[in-house]
Amino acid sequence: MSMTTFGEPCVLLKLGEVVLKGRNRELFEMRLRANIKAALKDYSVDIRQRHGVIALFLPEGTAYEVAAAVAQRVSEVPGLVLIHLAWRVPKDPEIVTKAAIELVRDTDEVARKAHFAVRSRRRDKRFPLRSNELDRLVGGAINDTYGLPVSLKNPELTVHIEVDRDEVFLFTGGIPGQGGLPVGSSGRGLVLMSGGIDSPVAAYRMMRRGLRVDFLHFSGIPFTTSESIYKAYALVRNLDKFQGKSRLWVVPFGKAQQSIRASGQDRLAMIAQRRLMLKTAEEVAHRIHAEALVTGDSLGQVSSQTLTNITAQDNAVDLPILRPLIGLDKTEIIAEARRIGTLEISELPDEDCCTLLAPRSAETRAKIEDLKLIEKRLDAEDLASQLADSIRPYRLDADT
């Protein structure tokens, strides 16, 4: 986007499914505005609500680069579908026309003599020109100035004009938002965070559905190093951009794994471990007021994720277990991990606690009765409570 002498840079935010919430819409919009304010705490921004649009006004004289940084930052806030870096100009057709000419002056499309179109929208019907009249006025001026051909069906360059209550906004493109719902509008959950590829993507998907999440990592300490903790911390810190004020809890799980191994049920050890993790996570969830557990399970991906074994794990707890990746294959999960920026961290080597109990041949059809016998010998309920007592919290903030 080129500079214009006729207005000030601002940012327009387009809402997605929030606008479909009917009587509850105001609550979702309040949550979204609060999340935007928190994400932009390092900037001076005036947040103004319109019908289906949120406008971010910056102080007079704000540099274009600052407005661009604001647009990029807010594109990470779930609940928005499009972010436009726009120019705010007075409601004067002549000024709007001159600003539009300057707006497209330095674009590649002008240099290539690309086809263009003008799309106007009047939220304020008091504006003296109808949308189609404004399209013709501005489009004719651009055509006369640069000789660009018009294409209303397949333009390579589109100049958008939105007439609002107090001003007119002009822009030529947009940054895709995260979509979904505002974080915090769907309650709180606890993510079982490994150092792998799947669980960070599961966490992101649930944040995008409005769930504020905390993270629980099971470390193999004292039988492994702290590498997996550092990795989990790095993953949570990366995901924090989507919700802010994330919390990571770490459980020293090595001795509990040793007890499971000593039970002698080698084929069932992995599922017994997963059930104990879930029981511990449920205890932690009750303490931090989380209403659901979240895992990165994908049906059939590994032996612990067969339908029978997933059913056996569900039986271990009363809280609902959300599995947003259940129908995705590994290729799809990897693609999303790459997009949200967690893949590179997940691929770093570490000593995952699960490797301590990896049997030569894992059970794919675990029986709940057999698992309960193991748990009875371990006194699993009491052990889960002890493990929850041993958790160590890590607080993450965007500025630390």
Image (spheres, rainbow, N blue to C red):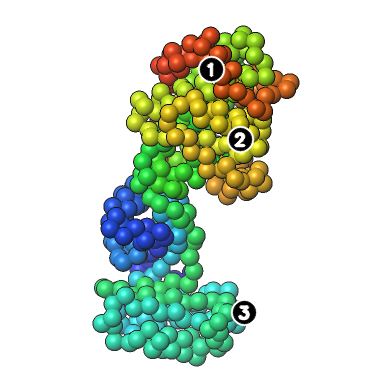
Label 2 close to label 3 by CB (< 8 Å): no
Left or right: where 50 falls relative to 231: left
Q: Position of residue 97 (x, y in %)?
A: 39, 83
Q: Is residue 157 visible?
A: yes
Residue plotted at (40% across, 87% down): 132
Q: Position of residue 338 (x, y in %)?
A: 60, 46
Give the quarter of the image for residue 274: top right
Q: CA distance from mark 1 to mark 3?
A: 71 Å
In the image, what residue type sits under mark 3?
Arg
Label 1 close to label 2 by CB (< 8 Å): no
Q: Which residue lies under the disc numbered 2?
A: 307
Residue plotted at (62% across, 39% down): 299
In the image, what residue type sits under mark 2?
Leu
Q: Nearer the viewer, residue 103 or 243?
A: 243
Q: Nearer the viewer, residue 68 or 379?
A: 379
Q: Position of residue 61 (x, y in %)?
A: 33, 64
Q: CA distance from mark 2 to mark 3?
A: 56 Å
Mark 3, Cα crowd under 10 Å, few <14 / some 14-19 / many 20+, is few
Q: What is the number of the mark on residue 372?
A: 1
- Compare marks 2 and 3 and give the one earlier in the sequence: 3
Position of 285 relative to 299 (above/below): above
